Structures are given as C-alpha cells and as structure tokens.
Image (spheres, grey):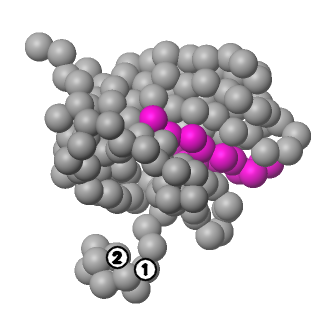
C-alpha cells in the first residue's frame, strides 16, 4: 500500500496517514508538508492544506505550519452528520491534545472512556491512548485540535 500512496495511485485514510506519521515520529502535518524556513508565516485560507476523505467527507484543515522542532500543530476538523474519524492509535508518551468544539456535538472516546462535548466545550487529554472523534449531533461538527508533541523529560 505504501508504494501505491507514494506513486499517487491510492490515497490513505486519515487513520492510515496518522499511523504512517506516528511510525516516522512526525505529525500528520509534517508528513503532508514541508518545514517553512521563516518564523512568521501566513497561511491564506485558499492555500492551507486540506485532507478530505472521499468516502466519508471528513475533512482535516491544517492551520499551522509543520515545524518538527516546535512540536505543536493546530488543525480544524469537519465531520459530516453521523460520521467519525475512526480510531487513532496512541501517540508517544508525553503527547497531549486539546479539543475545542466550534459547531455541533462531538463525542470523544479515549480507550474505554467517552466524553460528550457541545459547542464551546473543550477537552484536554494525554494522547498516549487510542482515541476517536464522532459527530453525534444534527448537521456537521467542526472542532479545533491542538496537538502538542513536545516530549517531557
């Protein structure tokens, strides 16, 4: 499958792309983009990377540059009604995530614990557990995700 992805024959699902990134010890944004050389970077809306799953319509908008040395990424995810991201594998120990729901209702499953978030709610968690995001409301769900990959010594 990797050779098909490299040749552009096949597009991976978000889960497969995240697993590849995790195996390479990089974020998904780093896998999909290059490290900018400037410290001040404007990403116009029409030029930001958007990863869209054709089958489900799930979208991942990369809102921050991919800086391997910085370890923080900001993404906006859009889940159509009744869809979910599938299960993401655990990150390395020390990686944390913050979820903020801008629109709709989101259910976050961390291993066997489930949390329901409404518009305006946020959730912080240590991301070294399997995790899944599901739209459980009417209409689409749009949420922001901050992933901090800095490892603590």
Q: Please name the residue that numbered disc 2 is placed on.
A: 5
Left or right, residue 65 beside residue 25 = right
Q: Nearer the viewer, residue 130 or 2?
A: 2
Question: Is 52 inside the magenta-drawn segment?
Answer: no
The reply to whether residue 129 is visible in this rendering is no
Name the mark on residue 10: 1
Dot 1 falls on a residue whose secondary structure is: loop
Highlighted range, magenta: 74-90
Q: Residue furthest left?
A: 153
Residue at point 71%, 29% (across, down)? 102
Dot 2 falls on a residue whose secondary structure is: helix
Residue at point 72%, 18% (across, down)? 120
Query: Main SS of the magenta segment?
Result: strand
Q: Residues within 10 Å of mark 2 (few under 14, many from 20)?
A: few
Q: Quadrant of residue 39?
A: top left
Question: Do callouts 2 and 1 mark residues in contact (Cβ within 8 Å)?
Answer: yes
User: Residue 76, percent across and down?
Assistant: 57, 41
User: Residue 62, percent across and down?
Assistant: 47, 47
């Amino acid at each position: 499958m990797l050779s098909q992805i490299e040749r552009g024959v096949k597009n991976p699902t978000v889960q497969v792309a995240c697993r590849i990134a995790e195996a390479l010890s990089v974020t998904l944004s780093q896998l999909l983009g290059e490290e900018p050389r400037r410290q001040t970077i404007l990403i116009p809306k029409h030029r930001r990377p958007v990863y869209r799953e054709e089958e489900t319509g799930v979208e991942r908008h990369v809102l921050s540059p991919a800086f391997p040395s910085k370890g923080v990424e900001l993404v906006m995810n859009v889940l159509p009604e009744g869809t979910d991201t599938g299960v993401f594998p655990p990150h390395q120990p020390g990686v944390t995530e913050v979820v903020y729901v801008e629109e709709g209702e989101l259910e976050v499953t961390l291993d066997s614990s489930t949390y329901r978030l409404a518009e305006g709610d946020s959730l912080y968690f240590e991301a070294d557990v399997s995790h899944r995001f599901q739209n459980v409301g009417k209409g689409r769900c749009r949420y922001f995700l901050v992933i901090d990959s800095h490892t603590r010594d």
